Amino acid sequence: MAMALAQPALHVARAESVLRLDGVTKVFKSGRRELTALEDVSLEVVRGEFVCILGASGCGKSTLLSLIAGLDRPSSGHVETSVGRPALMFQEPALLPWLTVRRNVELPLRLRRAEDAERRVTVNRLLAMVGLIDFADSRPHELSGGMRQRVALARSLAQESALLLMDEPFGALDAITRDTLHDDLTRIWEQTRSSIVFVTHNVREAVRLGDRVVLMGSRPGRVTRVWDIDLSRPRSLDSVEVASLASEITARLRSDINGDHH
């Protein structure tokens, strides 16, 4: 099937690639049964780019992130990253309840045996970045859902990877909290200039956050369309421009789900 592209090659030619997927296919086998979760997925992400992967449930978005993160291997095709191991953030914050906010954020630094002074400075900087420096000694049960996700974001940033993978990180939050975290994430991304691959099924969220939106179809999961998002920042979920483009993408998503690919 032909893939419609909104001139991404021009974008790629000007910047360093941090991630390249070339013909990635993933087949899960159970006895004699086979399930093709991803089929011939090719994608490139450049340094400092914010790419949103959008699609209906079951289209292989999370499987794709697992392959990029190195948690699984493709059945065929290649996944290449130029920045070492990516950082990964899930929908659930997965904080250790017996540790303080500071200790949770510190975990990646402890794992690479950073010195005490470096850990202290880095954690203070990250907690200030996510607006939680005053909660450094709190424990997860004392925080709201949005605050716990901020801690999880700070912990991901503590891995100091130039590529951050985010698997529907705000999907379980209420609309107001999610809107605030969109602002926070955009600000942090602009400060760090990391590359972000952000998985979501929320069309407006994808348009608000992304430089590009990659739409995936289902059964098997494959790229069906890519949009370059040329809207100025900061963006609002309620802006006419975001709503208009989200409507266009939603129409294409519906046609994919209904099997109309014309």
Image: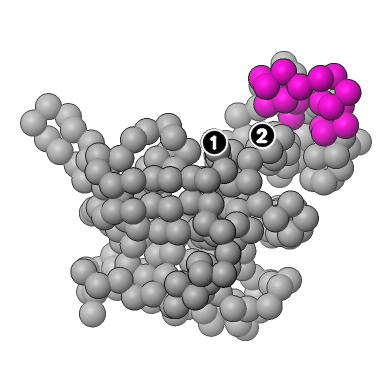
Q: x%, y% of residue 9?
A: 45, 72
Question: In the image, which residues are magenta?
Answer: 105-123
Q: Which residue corresponds to mark 2?
A: 159
Helix, strand or loop for disc 1 = loop
- Position of 150 compared to 47: left or right? right
Residue 12 numbered mark, or none: none
Vertical arrangement, residue 246 with respect to residue 198, above or below = below
The answer to which of marks 2 and 1 sits earlier in the sequence is 1
In the image, farthest residue toward the left: 32
Q: Is residue 109 magenta?
A: yes
Query: Hey, what amino acid is under mark 2?
Result: Gln
Q: Are marks 2 and 1 in contact (CB under 8 Å)?
A: yes
The image quadrant that residue 1 belongs to is bottom left
Q: Amino acid at mark 1?
A: Arg
Assign a secondary structure to mark 2: loop
- Residue 14, how many percent across, how many down? 57, 69
The residue under label 1 is: 85
Quadrant of the drawing holding the C terminus: bottom left
Spatial separation of the CA atoms under disc 2 and disc 1: 9 Å
